[in-house]
């Protein structure tokens, strides 16, 4: 494809929210997006994710990334994404039993009254405790794959050629959000930083560091279940606490011509709650989690719209910036309303396949109507 033709393609960045196993929806959406990338309907210049969304974007990016003796391709990205998600769900009999037990424990948390005097919090234990470590050590003997309960091991197996990535040739930027807990600052693991290391941070509460598989593990570390990840000179928990997902960096530290024309958000956590206001324990837990997953993102999107307004109002002053169109791809309202906080921990194949299939259907309809018959943020975050 010649350079003139390439310049006519719309530059798109895609951000995937975290939301546990609900991110299977994003797997389906990304599959359809990558099909259209292969058909050169637009140029995918960026991927961004947090927590389970980070896993989705990692695998799509990994399949695209050029490696030694392997240039990468959209089809490789589709295969890597779906094969990895298949492996992430429960496979063996023991894994399915463990999944059902843990899922039921979270269902208990949603009950108005504790069952047998306990709710889900009563089943918890520190992931660094001797008991927790002993149980973990026994799991392989019970036919539980190590990669099923060890995210770091899972990522190494999912990306066997990671060390052969040819960073200067990578065309799609990857951002993964995590939270550094000692300093209390948002952190972005950025593939651009693997080529050009970032300079001193102008804001000590924001960090941008080179991308790594440890960064993806950090992005998905809930301290109730996993030990804190130590990497890049810090200690990290889930990116949900800070950016879900990070998007502001797509428009900073890069020339205007390299910034996206459009930013598509794959929304896992519904923006709205059907009336009346939640009153039951389960509804309150569910809505708290949804809002925690949305509010930080909405602030970043509001900032981008503010910059758009400034470009319109002060064009000559803002000549180094270009406006961005922000759009949302989301589940059907029926599905969004039916999902619960507890189902974010359901790793059964049937459940995740259902969400993955919905993602494909929703995305195909949306992409067939893009760009003229789809909405823009913030209006398109709402259900009719």
Image (spheres, rainbow, N blue to C red):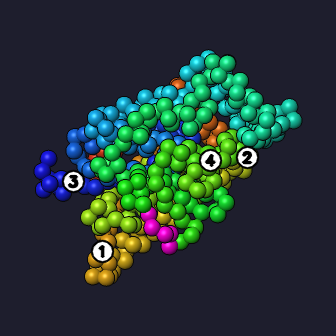
| Mark 2 / mark 4, whichever is N-terminal | 4
Q: Which residue is drawn at 21% across and 53% down?
A: 9
In the image, the segment drawn in magenta is 198-202
Does residue 2 appear left or right of residue 27 in this picture? left
Q: Residue at x 46, y 54 (%)?
A: 210
List the residue tagged with mark 2: 280
Q: In the rendered view, would you say 199 is above or below 162?
A: below
List the residue tagged with mark 4: 229
- Residue depth check, mark 2 versus mark 4: number of the one nearer the observer: 4
Q: In the rendered view, would you say 90 is above or below 331?
A: above
Residue in the foreground of this view, choosing between 57 and 281: 57
| Mark 4 / mark 1, whichever is N-terminal | 4
Q: Distance between the residues labelled 1 and 2?
A: 50 Å
Give neighbour class at mark 2: few <14, some 14-19, many 20+ (Cα, 10 Å).
few
Q: Distance between the residues labelled 3 and 1?
A: 20 Å
Q: Residue at x 61, y 56 (%)?
A: 234
- Residue depth check, mark 4 versus mark 1: number of the one nearer the observer: 4
Q: In the rendered view, would you say 283 is above or below 316?
A: above
List the residue tagged with mark 3: 9
Does residue 308 appear left or right of residue 129 in this picture? left
- Residue depth check, mark 4 versus mark 3: number of the one nearer the observer: 4
Q: Can residue 266 be seen in this view?
A: yes
């Amino acid at each position: 494809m010649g350079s003139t033709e390439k310049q006519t393609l719309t530059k798109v960045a895609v951000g995937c929210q975290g939301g546990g196993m609900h991110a299977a929806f994003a797997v389906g959406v990304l599959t359809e997006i990558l099909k259209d990338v292969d058909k050169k309907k637009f140029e995918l210049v960026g991927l961004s994710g947090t927590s389970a969304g980070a896993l989705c974007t990692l695998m799509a990016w990994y399949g695209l990334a050029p490696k030694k003796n392997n240039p990468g391709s959209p089809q490789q990205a589709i295969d890597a994404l779906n094969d990895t998600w298949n492996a992430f769900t429960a496979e063996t009999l023991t894994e399915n039993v463990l999944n059902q037990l843990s899922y039921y424990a979270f269902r208990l948390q949603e009950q108005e009254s504790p069952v047998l005097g306990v709710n889900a919090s009563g089943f918890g234990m520190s992931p660094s405790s001797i008991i927790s470590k002993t149980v973990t050590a026994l799991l392989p003997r019970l036919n539980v794959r190590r990669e099923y309960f060890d995210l770091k091991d899972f990522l190494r197996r999912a990306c066997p050629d990671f060390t052969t990535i040819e960073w200067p040739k990578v065309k799609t930027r990857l951002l993964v959000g995590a939270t550094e807990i000692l300093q209390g600052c948002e952190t972005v693991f950025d593939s651009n930083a693997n080529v050009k290391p970032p300079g001193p941070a102008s804001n000590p509460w924001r960090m941008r560091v080179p991308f790594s598989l440890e960064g993806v593990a950090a992005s998905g570390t809930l301290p109730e279940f996993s030990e804190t990840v130590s990497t890049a000179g810090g200690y990290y928990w889930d990116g949900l606490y800070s950016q879900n997902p990070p998007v502001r960096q797509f428009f900073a530290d890069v020339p205007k011509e390299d910034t996206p024309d459009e930013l598509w958000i794959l929304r896992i956590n519904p923006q709205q709650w059907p009336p009346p206001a939640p009153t039951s324990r389960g509804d309150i837990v569910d809505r708290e989690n949804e809002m925690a997953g949305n509010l930080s993102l909405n602030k970043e999107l509001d900032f981008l719209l503010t910059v758009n307004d400034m470009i319109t109002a002060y064009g000559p002053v803002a000549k180094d910036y270009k406006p961005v169109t922000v759009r949302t791809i989301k589940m059907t309202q029926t599905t969004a309303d039916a999902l619960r906080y507890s189902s974010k921990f359901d790793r059964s194949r049937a459940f995740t396949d259902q969400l993955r299939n919905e993602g494909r259907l929703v995305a195909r309809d949306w992409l067939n109507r893009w760009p003229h018959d789809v909405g823009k943020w913030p209006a398109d975050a709402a259900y009719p």
